[in-house]
Amino acid sequence: MYRDGITEVTCIDLSAVAVEKMQKRLKAKGYKEIKVLEADMLDLPFNEECFDVVIEKGTMDVLFVNSGDPWNPRSETVAQVKAMLEGVHRVLKPDGIFISISFGQPHFRRPLFDAPDFTWSVEWSTFGDGFHYFFYVLRKGKRSSSDEGSSGKKEIPSICLFQEELEGEDFIFRTNIDEIS
Ligand SMILES: C[S@@+](CC[C@H](N)C(=O)[O-])C[C@H]1O[C@@H](n2cnc3c(N)ncnc32)[C@H](O)[C@@H]1O
């Protein structure tokens, strides 16, 4: 991005060690304009509508480390993700774009991105071979009425699985084939 001329960049990390290392790396490369700040993504220290683009890679995923059952994450996890997304939505300009690069599958991420308060549209591309990751693009102000209509339908399935069951692919036996149209 920097080499393509996008020099007005602000990076954050909660870890002072990560911030210091990144500051040194950027200085060594001569990327002087890039700011690196110690900050919490759950409480972004920026004014409203000040960024054209927000990018996160693998940082939202951190919130899911202790989230328990992926089909039914703990309420603390959901509250933290909500705080993060509300902050991102707040600091984006009215036509700003949020890019989230994540291992979280659309089935699990989409209901969070699609929360009713957000005005962004949600699209994604899948990458990787076997071990997939996802490139979500959320465009603020571009949510269509059909997105709003469908967001209510994107419920997490009521089946509840443990990690061993997911790995053993037992979940396939719980599929209600009557629901497949
Ligand atoms: C998996 S690493 C990804 C780092 C980087 N985006 C990359 O792709 O290499 C997750 C990073 O999130 C940071 N982090 C964890 N919780 C955070 C928070 N609440 N606010 C800001 N950064 C956080 C960690 O310190 C860590 O550097």
Image (tube, rainbow, N blue to C red):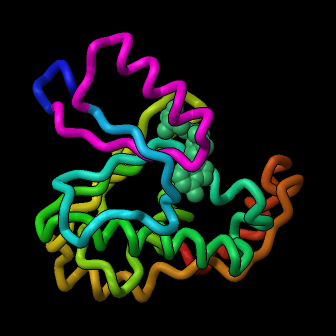
Where in the image, quadrant-wise, is ligand 1 located? top right
140 or 86: nearer the viewer: 86
Q: Is residue 31 magenta?
A: yes
Which quadrant of the view contains residue 114?
bottom left
* Residue 86 appears anywhere in the view: yes
| Residue in the image at 59% along x and 31% along y | 130
Residue 32 horizontal/vertical position (percent): 26, 24
The quarter of the picture where residue 143 lies is: bottom left
- Quadrant of the image containing the N terminus: top left
Query: Looking at the picture, does residue 52 appear above or below residue 49?
Result: above
Count the numbered circles shown: 0
Q: Where is residue 121 drawn, in percent x and y?
A: 24, 68
| Rendered position, 149 above or below 170 | below
Q: Is residue 97 above or below residue 30?
A: below
Q: Provide residue 21's location: percent of width, then percent of height.
A: 53, 25
Q: Residue at image x 47%, y 79%?
A: 154
Task: Tell me the magenta residue range.
Answer: 7-33
The quadrant in which residue 46 appears is bottom left
> Percent x, y for residue 139?
21, 62
- Which residue is found at the position 32% from the left and 38% from the top? 35
Foreground of the two, 101 or 148: 101
Q: Is residue 103 visible?
A: no
